Amino acid sequence: MNKKINSSYETAANVFTAFDIAQPLKMFLPDESLISVWEEFMTQYPIEWFSLVRDSRHTYGYLAFDDEAFQSWPIKGLAREEASHVEPEIVVPASLPLLELIPLFQESYFFFLLSRNEITHYVSFSDLDKLPFKFCLFGLFMELESQLVELLSIDNSKTKQYLSLLTKERLKKAEDLCTQKYKKETPYHLLLCTTFVDKKEMFMKSLDFKKDELPFESKNKTNRFFRKIEDVRNQIAHSDSILQKLRTPSELNVFINDLSNLTNTIANMKDKALI
């Protein structure tokens, strides 16, 4: 039976909660004019997309920046007249772990957070571009790279063979770094000085590893997925938006699942090799 590794992604995504990436809700009284709500929206940068309409006794609903009531001029009416009802399906606990929140974005682009029986914040799919989730996602990349290192270093003589699969230029860069970091150059130390792309190249080029065990239909699809990993890793490393590469909740969830399956498969290859 294939075992599932206890990934650092799952650990981190269970530590961070919806509240850690959420935004506070602006509150408006029910008899406040819509124009004043609009003006308040426009003073915020970046724009706070949602606001709550409530008084001390009752929550009337919420207003969103793109509501139809704000799309024509002049803006008329009262906040309570245009507020949308807060359906139970779009309310989650503020303590909900990110691990459980992320799949929910396939059902709704945003959620309101319930804290001590009060709705106080909201969280949207775009909030996954914040540091807590990037940290969780990077944990998956580190887990994959760690499994590749273990697989490629089971046998010292094999490690030398895998390193020979790199281009002269890539191997020279690893050797230069190894000289700086370690007193003695060994195949293992040299392997540690290769990049993620180098490790991927060694893994894909070696005939020792059965590519048909990987969770993809073809070698081309495997290579395309590795390139996507590189793209998303680079976005995080350069503090850029990961949502430029993973644009929808469905695409993000498929990516996470595929990445987890790939990591687990490589971990199982390593375990078989050790038997």
Image: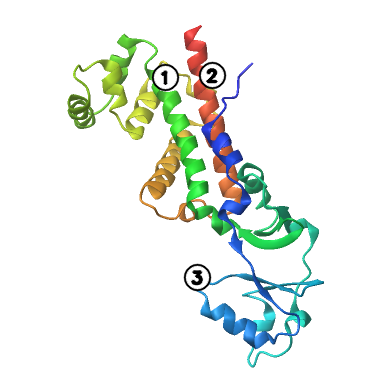
Q: Residues under labels 2 and 3: Cα distance?
A: 45 Å
Disc 3 marks a residue whose amino acid type is: Pro
Q: How dense is the environment of label 3, judged by Cα within 10 Å: few (below 14), some, or many (20 and up)?
A: few
Res. 219 in view: no
- Mark earlier in primary sequence (3, 1): 3
Disc 2 marks a residue whose amino acid type is: Asn
Query: Quarter of the image holding residue 216?
Result: top right
Q: Residues under labels 1 and 2: Cα distance?
A: 11 Å
SS class, disc 3: loop
Q: Residues under labels 3 and 1: Cα distance?
A: 44 Å
Give the labeled residue for mark 1: 150
SS class, disc 2: helix
Disc 1 marks a residue whose amino acid type is: Glu
SS class, disc 1: helix
Answer whether labels 1 and 2 touch (C-beta < 8 Å): no
Q: Which mark is residue 241?
A: none
Residue that appears at 37% across and 46% down: 237
Residue that appears at 38% across and 19% down: 152
Query: Toward the viewer: 22 or 255?
Result: 22
**Disc number lying in front (1 or 2):** 1
Residue that appears at 57% across and 34% down: 11
Give the labeled residue for mark 2: 268
